[in-house]
Structures are given as C-alpha cells and as structure tokens.
Image (cartoon, rainbow, N blue to C red):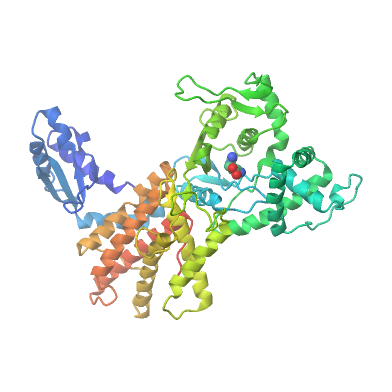
Amino acid sequence: MNKLLDLISEEMKKAFEASGYDRELGKVTLSNRPDLCEYQCNGAMAGAKLYKKAPIMIAGDVAEHCKDSDVFSSVEAVAPGFLNLKVKESFVTAYLLQMCREEKFGLDMPEHPSRIIVDYGGPNVAKPLHVGHLRSGVIGESIKRIARYAGHEVIGDIHLGDWGLQMGLIITELKERQPELVYFDENYQGEYPQDAPFTISELEEIYPTASSKSKEDAAYKERAMDATFKLQSGVRGYRALWDHIIRVSVADLKKNYQNLNVEFDLWKGESDVHDVIPGMVEYMKKEGYAYISEGALVVDVKEETDTKEIPPCMILKSDGASLYNTTDLATIMERMREYHPDRMIYLTDKRQELYFEQVFRCARKTKLVEPETELLHIGFGTMNGKDGKPFKTREGGVMRLETLIQEINDEMYRKITDNRQVDEEEARQTAKVVALSAIKYGDLSNQASKDYIFDIDKFTSFEGDTGPYILYTIVRIKSILNKIREQGGKIEGNVLREADSDSEKALMLQLTGFNAMMATAYAETAPHKICAYIYELANAFNRFYHETKIVTEENEEKKSGWVALLLLTRDVLETCIDVLGFSAPERM
Ligand code: ARG
C-alpha cells in the first residue's frame, strides 16, 4: 500500500506540472509548524532560481491548481513561498479504511525476503547475567522482531561464550574442591553420572573465585590453561563436566531471558565451531591470506582509504591457540554453509566496533562470505546510572540482571497498589508486565549507539515518554471498549467515519504514518523510531479522549466510528509494542 506522504506528494507534483513547473518540486513533508498546517511543500522556494520568479508567485500558481483536489482541503501560499497544506477528512478516512483491510496495516512485504541472522545476547556460561547484558538482549530481540514483521526470515542466535579459559578455570576449581570426582579419574571407562556435581548458585560462585585465584597464583593459572587445553582436545571426563556446566547454566539463562521476553532460535556457542577452525586456518594459509607475523598467524585488513590504523586480524596466537576473532570467523563460515544468510547483524557494546570492522574485513577478504552478504555491527552505548557513570549497585558492584528486574518489579508493584484495593496475585502479575515495558522502552527509546541514563523513577512513571504511559493508554482504550460492551454496544463491525474534531483528525493522521514508520525502522534497524511513533500516537489518542465523551455519545453513528478508531489505535499500539518485545495487561 502506498505511503500517505507519497500519495500527497503525487497530488502536489501534479499541481506543479499543471502550473508549468517541474513536477519533482512537489515533494511534501510533515509540517514543521503543526499549529499552521498538517503538511508542507517547499518546492516553490527551490523553483525560484530555476524559473527566475519570486517563490510566492510560483506557490500562488500551484495553490490555484489545487482548488479541485480530492486530497487537499486547504493549500495556502505563504511568504516567502511556502505551501501550507491540510488534507481532506474524506481522504484520510479512505486511507485508514484501506489500511484496516490490508495485512499488516498496509506495510508492503518484500518481493524477495532476506534471510537474516541476528547474533545477540552473547552471555558467557557459568557467569550470571548482569546489567551489561541487558542492551544486547533487548535491542537484538527488537531488531529480530522488526525484521520478521517486515517480512524477512530471521534467525536469532545467542552465540554463547562457552569455550575459552573460563571453562578451564571452572574445571580447575572443581578439581581443587572435589578431586575424588570420577571426571578426574583418567582410567575411568564407564558412563558419567546424569546429575551435575554442582548447582547454578555454586557454579556462579566457583567462576569468580577461580578467576581471582588465577590472577594471583601463576601455577593455578597454568593448571587452568592446561584444563582448557585438555577440554578442547576432547578428554572424556572434562567434556562430561563441560556438558554439565552448559546444561545447568543454559537452563538458568533460559529462565532469565524468558523473564525478559527474549527468545533465541539457536543456542549455539563458540564451542560449536571448535572443530572447523583447523580447516579454516589451513584454507587461509593455503590461499595466501594469512601469514606469520611475530610468531602469530595474521591476515592484513587495512585498506588504502583508511583514515585510521586498522591492525591486522589475528587468527592464531604464537602458541597456536585460537582467539575470539577465530571463533567469530569460523562462525561466519559455518553460518554461510548451514544457512546461507543474506545478512548477519551483531549486537554488542560499541567498544567492539574496531574488532568487528577487522572481523568483517577479514571475512570478506578471505571470501568466507559472498560479495553481497551484508555484515552489520550495531554497537550500543553504555547504560549509566544517574551519576552518569556505568550503572552499579548501591555498594558500587556489578548489578545482576535478576536483581535489577526484581527492583523494578517491586517499584511497579508499589505504584500499582498505592492507595488501592487490589488482588495481590493479579497486581504482582501486572507489575511484572508493566515493569518490563519500563525497562525495555527506557532502553529502546534511545538511539542504540548513545549512552543513556537508567532512571528508575522516570522509566516507571505513568506519564511522559515511558513504557508504562504507552501501556496505560492501551489499557485505557481497552477499558472504554469494555464499558461500551457492557452497555450492550457492539464492538465488531463498526466502520471509521470522517473526523469530527481537530483532535480526532490528528489521531487519524498519526495512524496513517504506520507503514512508513515501520519501513524506516527496518531499513535503519532503529527501534527508537517505533518508540517515537507510539509516543506521538498515545499523545494524539489521549488528546482526543480528553476532548470527546465517547461512552455517553448518543449519536450511534458517531459512536460507531469512534469504536472503529479505538480498535485501530489499540491494534497499532499493540503491534508496535510486540515488535519492541513487550506487551500490555488487560487492566492496570
Ligand atoms: N560473549 C561475548 C562477550 O561477553 C559477546 C559475544 C558477542 N557476539 C559475537 N559474535 N562476538 O563479550
């Protein structure tokens, strides 16, 4: 379905043409002065030079040719040569009626859908999720959903950190504590036990202990490196322990991500490409891409046009060990082989920008991907506390994600139950749903690359540019619809009418922008555009609501048109928040 702005522009272009001017001058944009008009066209200004004529004269000619338009209710030429435009109510209503009939409210589906892999989350096993993991999960989930809604085939991969020294450290610490475990008996031939010799809480304590020991004790670190080596070379007992670590940790991660409404299609990790690394390295050497530099195996990735120094991409360390780079490159190779994606999108902290630049260049140069395969890194900014420094606990430590979520849930519960008699169970449930909107909207409403301040008071407020405000608006619509239903009014089968008031028209106009907004959000991988849109939509709805007595309206036709408008507004809002990765309760 055409975008509304394109239809309006087309009408304006016709008027330019009919007045004897270049039709391309007729491009229309949203108004900079909503107090004066709804849309504007600056083509007469641009035409002044071309036609050696005062812009106001050109604008006057064009306005004259818009007199019989089905689109414009008013076209004003104003000094020095702007065209201020208002559209007809009938035009807006016709557009919305079609939007209701179309699938996805008139968002065009791609002729050739892309296959996209989104690599996000990226937690490390055996380490609890902390606030630093929030953004990758939240933004990645939304980008995945936007692409899916836009009609593409999208695969979300968590890309677990499950293979490096951290695993060796855990195994080493376990051996210190329980040397008698059968996993450490080299002569053991039988089956290993089904149950892990540790719980998730133990595991989460073991890792930091091992990590700090290794920093102080060189021999301990040596043992951990040896354990890592043994694990990677396939020693049975170590593999069995590793399986336990993964299983226990992944079960916990699943629970945590579920609480965030984040779902991965693939739970692959760095370990999955271990076996393909030797072949990849061989290939890079054989083709002459990789060479030895100071003992290490590297691929040059600098380009002539570089303005800053881009160091070579290291493939193997001088001791032959693989690196973070190596697994990412091998993963790209595997993804191409298994899924042949058109695009791969990575979400990490923006401090990894240079790193991904190197990896992507290396993947292109060594032809692990095809020339048209798109590789995109979205680097996000830091989540800061109110002091402007990276978010910490009150004691100054790293805050666990679970703790953060719990704090917001509690705050939301307090707000919901404040001065009210409510069912405890229902209030807890509602608090959870609203809290998630507070966290996610607070994050997503910022451009991803920017740092932002995680401000609990602001994010959980029911007023302003927040998740709870959006949910509150949706719940308000639902409650009006319920009242009408209780009165015996019908909800289905109503038809939109022409707007009766300015606020109603403004709401309708905001609704017409859905397809254009969603197309942009996909093209620019920009969830914040959806937030900005629904914030405006919620504002437009609330203005209309405050000026209109919907439930008590006696004119049945009017009321029926409003019910249809309410339903469309609710559906568009709910579609948008679903794409952002949260939902609205029935009541709150
Ligand atoms: N596990 C990594 C970390 O904690 C993040 C992984 C990001 N994804 C990737 N393909 N490198 O830093």
Pick the residue in front: 95 or 443: 443
Residue 318 versus residue 269 in the image, above or below: above
Residue 492 visible within the image = no
* Rendering coords of residue 391 (x, y %): 50, 52
**Between residues 64 and 425, which one lies in front from this camera angle?**
425
Residue situated in front as seen by the camera: 125 or 337: 125
- Name the quadrant containing residue 508: bottom left
Q: Position of residue 82 (x, y in %)?
A: 14, 42
Report how many numbered discs are placed on residues in the image.
0
**Quadrant of the rendered image holding ligand 1:** top right
Quarter the C terminus occupies: bottom left
Tell me residue 317's x, y (percent): 68, 28
Residue at image coords 52%, 72%:
428
Residue at 73 percent of width and 59 percent of height: 199
Left or right, 58 with reference to 458: left
* Residue at left offset 54%, top offset 28%: 361
User: Who is closer to the viewer here, 272 or 392?
Assistant: 392
Quarter location, residue 226: top right
Which residue is at 35% across, 73% downward?
Answer: 480
Specify the quadrant of the image occupied by residue 251: bottom right
Residue 220 in percent (x, y) is at 77, 42
* Residue 217 is at least partly visible in this image: yes
Side of 19 where 6 appears, left or right = right
